């Protein structure tokens, strides 16, 4: 794969927090934002506002409950975390439209987007 092909594929498969917010604002019913992080509650205290928390280990069990008519945007901790990529593969193999949120929850918070407590 050439460098240009790599970067084109990367752009096709990811969305930045800013682009997601803009797209979700113009088409609010098009997306489902899913937090796929696995962690104990004392570590994982918050998620992006409006996100659904489905830990990666539980994702295969609930595929039938997810909408096929939405673009699913998955995220994990940061650029060093690959749980969102693993979730995207599972979803793509099951015919979902998927994007990975670039930078995960760390990027989301870094740009000042709202978070909510995970209960």
Image: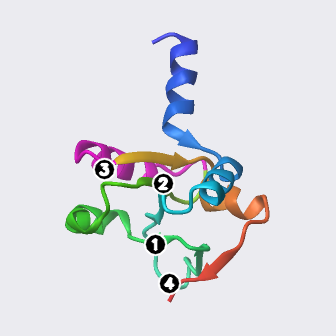
Choose the circle earlier in sequence order: 2 or 3.
2
Q: How far is disc 3 from disc 1 in space, using C-alphas?
A: 15 Å
**Is disc 2 placed on a helix, strand or loop?**
strand
Q: How far is disc 4 from disc 1 in space, using C-alphas?
A: 15 Å
Percent x, y for residue 9? 49, 26
Location of residue 74 with respect to 64 vertically, above or below:
above
Please tell me which residue is depicted at 55% across the width and 85% down the height of the picture: 42
Percent x, y for residue 1? 45, 12
Percent x, y for residue 72? 43, 55
Q: How far is disc 2 from disc 3 in space, using C-alphas?
A: 10 Å
Choose the circle earlier in sequence order: 4 or 1.
4
The crowding category of the residue bearing disc 1, from other C-alpha atoms within 10 Å (few below 14, some 14 to 19, many at least 20), is some
Please tell me which residue is depicted at 65% across the width and 46% down the height of the picture: 16
Cβ atoms under marks 3 and 1 closer than 8 Å: no
Q: Which residue is mark 1?
A: 52
Q: Is residue 64 left or right of residue 11?
A: left
Please tell me which residue is depicted at 48% across the width and 58% down the height of the picture: 31
Q: Which residue is mark 2?
A: 73
Percent x, y for residue 82? 46, 49
Cβ atoms under marks 3 and 4 closer than 8 Å: no
Q: Nearer the viewer, mark 3 or mark 4?
A: 3
**Is disc 1 placed on a helix, strand or loop?**
strand
Cβ atoms under marks 2 and 3 closer than 8 Å: no
Q: Which residue is mark 3?
A: 91
Choose the circle earlier in sequence order: 3 or 4.
4
What range of the chain is rendered magenta? 79-96
Location of residue 3 with respect to 49 vertically, above or below:
above
Magenta segment's dominant SS is helix
Work out whether residue 86 or residue 32 is closer to the camera in this orientation and state it: 32
**Is disc 4 placed on a helix, strand or loop?**
loop
Choose the circle earlier in sequence order: 3 or 1.
1
Location of residue 105 with respect to 89 vertically, above or below:
below
């Amino acid at each position: 794969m050439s460098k240009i092909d790599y970067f084109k594929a990367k752009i096709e498969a990811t969305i930045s927090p800013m682009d997601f917010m803009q797209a979700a604002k113009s088409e609010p019913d098009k997306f489902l934002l899913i937090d796929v992080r696995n962690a104990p509650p004392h570590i994982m205290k918050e998620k992006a506002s409006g996100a659904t928390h489905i830990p990666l280990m539980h994702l295969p069990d609930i595929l039938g409950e997810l909408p096929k008519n939405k673009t699913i945007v998955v995220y994990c901790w940061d650029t060093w975390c690959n749980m969102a990529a693993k979730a995207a593969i599972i979803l793509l193999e099951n015919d979902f439209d998927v994007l990975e949120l670039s930078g995960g929850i760390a990027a989301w918070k870094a740009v000042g987007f709202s978070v909510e407590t995970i209960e």
